[in-house]
Image (cartoon, rainbow, N blue to C red):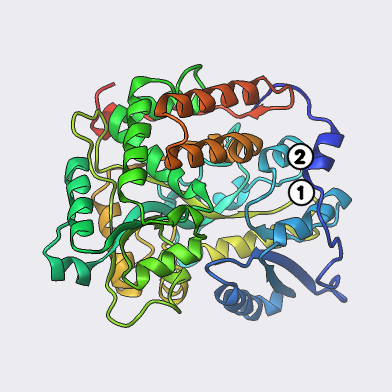
Amino acid sequence: MRIRAVMGAACLAFALCGCDALRRIPVGAGDMKIVEAAVFEGGYGIEWHRKVAGKYSEEHAGDHVRVELWGDPRVAEKIKPRLLRGDPPDLFLMLGLPVWMLIADGKLRDFNAALEKPAYGTATRWRDLFIPGTLDMFTSDGKVYALPSAFGAWACWYDARMFRRHGWTVPKTWREFDALCRAIRMAGVEPIAFQGKYPNYGWFTFVTLIQRCGGLAAINRINLFEPGAFSHPDVVHAARLTQEMARNHFQRGAMAMTHTESQLQFVNGHAAMIWCGIWLENEMKNSTPPGFEMRCFNVPAVEGGKGNPNLFNGMGAEWIFVPADARFPEEAQDFARYLVSPINAPDMGASIGVISPMRGATPRSAVSPALQSVLDMMDNAPGIFSVRADALFLEWTQEVMQPSLSALLRGESTPEQFCRRLDDGIAAACANPDAIIPPHVPYDPVRFGEQP
């Protein structure tokens, strides 16, 4: 890991300011080891995780191990003081923490030893089952500091029933996508719902368009933080396409909507499409009317672009961490190995609509037609890609990327101004003496069918 400067304890203390430092789970009695697991309670809820924790505890009763699992939408804020105090939960599943600061300060335990063990339900080494690239997000110096419990992918969602009714087809190119949006509006339907109060929902579409326009070479320049990477003509072109989509085809009033408000517009048929991650179906399951046929497609190819259009913006998601100060770290990592395993992946897909980060572990029969369309996208893709700046530089994300992207989508800045602001912000973030910049292994364009 390349650390620009040794981070002071004061920096970490500031980053971990939070509330409610009380321990939720009592310390084990006698020889019983009670593993405390804290889980972000978001779109997937925590009931499935509780069920798995119960199964694990039953199967390990003879080992005197029990998992007590709790969840909260603000779980990150609630465990930050405990991390500082050296009394954290034994395992936590969430984002919203300064992960690289925690790694640099020795606050997280690596999973390398656990990854060498066989996965539950197979004789195959646990590490070998993960989809290539999904372990990379929080890996440094060969050590894996976080495990994904889900696979994340970005896609455009639509109602197949509405498309059939109007004779619309899934676009293969960006020009076809633009024509489709115009046809949808001519039919009296808003083309694209958008989660405008949270402009970061537009980030992943923009990033995918960068790959479509400039290939993986453009993604590599951004991930290596090359000066001017965002101001490259290919990236400016991607920003222009993003802005034109927003200005011409977003639902009127979309920039004032929350994620659930815009998603309600979509499932109620007021807008024909929406860009979102694959959690969408589960998040909206209680609001989606009968007969709605949710399906997805990949970001179309851009005419004249350098990128392989079968690649998609994907990564590991729903990250699991075990702190160095855990009381029972080995038992916590064993529970993680059980939670993220082939024996639980089918039920995870069926119960909460999550695709496993393990290759082939989620059978088509276990998931809905909506998620089957995600599996189709995965089957057609030679690989995945992502950018890391938003996860690495949290301050840049909050203070530069999100407001700049909002201005682009509103038409308040030009694509050139937007890209220059991103570059300026990245330069400032990299110049920060407290910046922690782990090495990055570039994607190989030739391997994925692109020109070098």
Residue 274 in the image: state x and y as whole percent.
35, 58
Mark 2: few/some/many CA within 10 Å (<14, 14-19, 20+): few
- Looking at the image, do the residues carrying marks 1 and 2 touch, with CB atoms under 8 Å apart? yes
Q: Inspect the image, locate mark 1, and give the three-letter code of the amino acid beneath it.
A: Ala
Q: Position of residue 402 (x, y in %)?
A: 55, 41
- Residue 235, quarter of picture: top left
Q: Residue at x 81, y 35 (%)?
A: 11
Q: Is residue 452 left or right of residue 339?
A: left
Tell me: 155 left or right of 105: left
Q: Which residue is mark 2?
A: 106
State the count of labels: 2
Residue shown at 24% from the left, 44% from the top: 300
Identify the disc placed on residue 300: none
Can see residue 327?
yes
Name the element at disc 2.
loop
Q: Quadrant of the C terminus?
A: top left
**Circle 1 sits on which residue?**
324
Q: Nearer the viewer, residue 182 or 215?
A: 182
Q: Is residue 383 above or below residue 220?
A: below
- In the rendered structure, which amino acid carries the disc numbered 2? Gly
